[in-house]
Amino acid sequence: MTPSDNGRIPATLCGLWGGIDWKKWHSVMPKDTPHPQGYKLVQAVKHRRDFDRLYKYKKGESYGIPYRILTPKGIDNLLVAGRCVSSDHLVHGSIRVMPACYIMGQAAGLAAHQAAETNVSVHDIDVKKLQKSLLKIGAFLPNAKV
């Protein structure tokens, strides 16, 4: 896959691969190993910088998704993400799109890991620690106070 001629950034680079630290990835892989999407490291870094400059929300342009919508009431150690979360129809209209589903899935995976590591229910994990983990991989959490 190569960038399109009009200079737009491929969605896979902005979304699915957006949280990967390419310098770390290349430091553990042989130097001639190509980027998983066919990009060279320099191209990936440039596209990421362009994406952050052009397409990231600015302060006040978005809202956060609370962790509690991933944990259904009355069922212990179950996490849901994406279109399966519980919300009213107005909110569901905006959180069912791929970027929101992606970050909810990432949060659910990290929460499951944290719950297993600390031997607590997913309802009782340290949400601040989860937010720090998400921020560390580059998640955009506009309401996080960590």
Image (tube, rainbow, N blue to C red):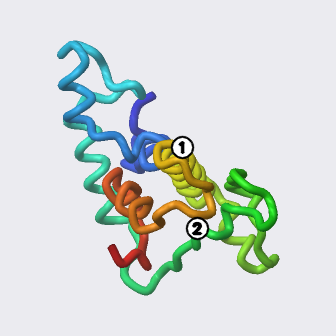
Q: What percent of the width, then of the height, locates residue 70?
A: 66, 62
Image quadrant holding the N terminus, namely top left
Q: Which kind of residue does numbered mark 2 sit on?
A: Tyr
Q: What percent of the width, then of the height, locates residue 106?
A: 52, 49
Foreground residue among 128 and 104: 128
Q: What percent of the width, then of the height, locates residue 30?
A: 21, 13
Instruction: Name the residue: 76% across, 80% down.
Output: 90
Foreground residue among 45 and 111: 111
Identity of the residue furthest to the bottom in this view: 60
Residue holding disc 1: 116
Q: Residues within 10 Å of mark 2 (few under 14, many from 20)?
A: some
Q: Nearer the viewer, mark 1 or mark 2?
A: 1
Q: Residues within 10 Å of mark 1 (few under 14, many from 20)?
A: some
Residue 45 placement: quadrant: top left
Residue 21 placement: quadrant: top left
Q: Which kind of residue does numbered mark 1 sit on?
A: Ala
Foreground residue among 89 and 79: 79
Please tell me the numbered disc located at residue 67: 2
Task: Work out whether mark 1 precedes mark 2 in sequence or the reverse, and give the earlier one.
Answer: 2
Q: Is residue 7 above or below residue 132?
A: above
